[in-house]
Amino acid sequence: MELEEAKLQFIEAWGKLGSEWGINRTMAQVHALLLITPEPISTEEIMEQLSISRGNANMTIRDLINWGLVEKQLKPGERKEYFYADKDTWNIARQVARERRKRELEPVIKVLNELTKVEGDSKDPAYKTFHKTVKDINKLAANVDKLFVTVLNAEESWFWGSIFKIFK
Amino acid sequence: MELEEAKLQFIEAWGKLGSEWGINRTMAQVHALLLITPEPISTEEIMEQLSISRGNANMTIRDLINWGLVEKQLKPGERKEYFYADKDTWNIARQVARERRKRELEPVIKVLNELTKVEGDSKDPAYKTFHKTVKDINKLAANVDKLFVTVLNAEESWFWGSIFKIFK
DNA sequence: TTAAACTTTCAGTAATTATTGAAAATTAAA
DNA sequence: TTTAATTTTCAATAATTACTGAAAGTTTAA
């Protein structure tokens, strides 16, 4: 396989995976492109390589920067902005985990906490089932959250740090 | 808060979380409804409670059955089918992990493995970056996969079993 | 200031994904 | 068989989500 074809395949694969995991396809594709590009590149180049519009490119890059996956670089004497991606996979995984925890997990846990407090007739099966399910799911969510935090801070804990080293 | 309102909130929260994690909203909502319903219920009841069409209800239920999250129950002497959800959160998490691994992770790992093999000029920065990134991401994906498998089989392993007990 | 180089915004449109509803298929009892 | 109860399918449509492109905004240099 040619390098050029391989690049396209990588971009496609990463894009597909992203969209299956709730990150929009273009965003994952731009990220993929930056991951396999040695030097920082401009919006123009991104537009060209992926055949997307300026507007789309611009917004996608901003999103990636907000996610902490991409950074801006200014070249002295030049007006144009250049972009590059952090290529350390551990950082990428951590960054994504951090964002999704904040954006999606935390709000749900908040709601579940509230719902745990709802009172009712403990003889009513509808109430009993509701209460038990919410409690269990709340616990699961809290544990997933705990897992995220653990992974995010794995470096600092000697116990988890050594466990997670297996996965690095 | 009233039980009925709380139920709606739970269904909404679970639906939202589902859609953020690549499971379609209705599917997550039907699942939520079944989770908080003590007895198996019919398609009719699901349609009513969630105000969805028969077609939608039917297809969604089939999907949930395929995901291993819902089961059918036939009442003797009745034609109608009734459905209920497994309420053990550990099973739910495991089942979802199992399916997503199979459907999404495995195909990507296959592609990445191929891309790792692409050859090129080791002096070309474009090639070097491509190769390193693909190799790293492949490793990350393989590790996530390994993590999934470990979690899926945690019960059986003495070591991981005791680690994961912390999260049960 | 003006102008050129560039970035950002967003209304309109396109593409994708989900849902409906009615017709077809299946099942089982009469 | 026929009929009634039920489930399944799928073309049409609705809802959602993503993208475009041009206009407005910003920045810097002359």
Image (tube, coloured by chain):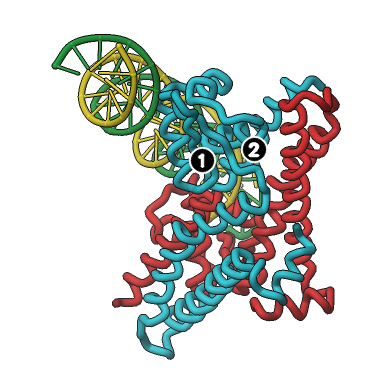
Chain colours: A red, B cyan, C yellow, D green
- Give the labeled residue for mark 2: B14
The structure residue drawn at horizontal position 52% and vertical position 37%, both measured from the top left corner, is: B27
Q: Position of residue A104 (x, y in %)?
A: 68, 45
For the point 79% across and 68% down, which residue is it? A153
What element does badge 2 sit on? helix
In the displayed structure, would residue A51 be above or below residue A90?
Answer: above
Q: Residues within 10 Å of mark 1 (few under 14, many from 20)?
A: some
Residue at screen point 50% across, 81% down: B132
In the image, residue B83 sits, relative to residue A42, either above or below, namely: above
Q: Could you tell me residue B60's position as x and y percent? A: 46, 35
Q: Is residue C29 left or right of residue A21?
A: left
Q: Quadrant of residue A91?
A: bottom right
Asked if both marks, 2 and 1, belong to the same chain, the answer given is yes
Q: Camera-side residue: A161 or C10? A: A161
Q: Is residue B84 above or below residue A54?
A: above
Q: Which residue is mark 1?
A: B71
Distance in Å between CA atoms under marks 2 and 1: 19 Å
Which chain does the numbered disc 1 sit on?
B
> Quadrant location of the N terminus of chain B?
top right
In the rendered view, would you say B63 is above or below D11?
below
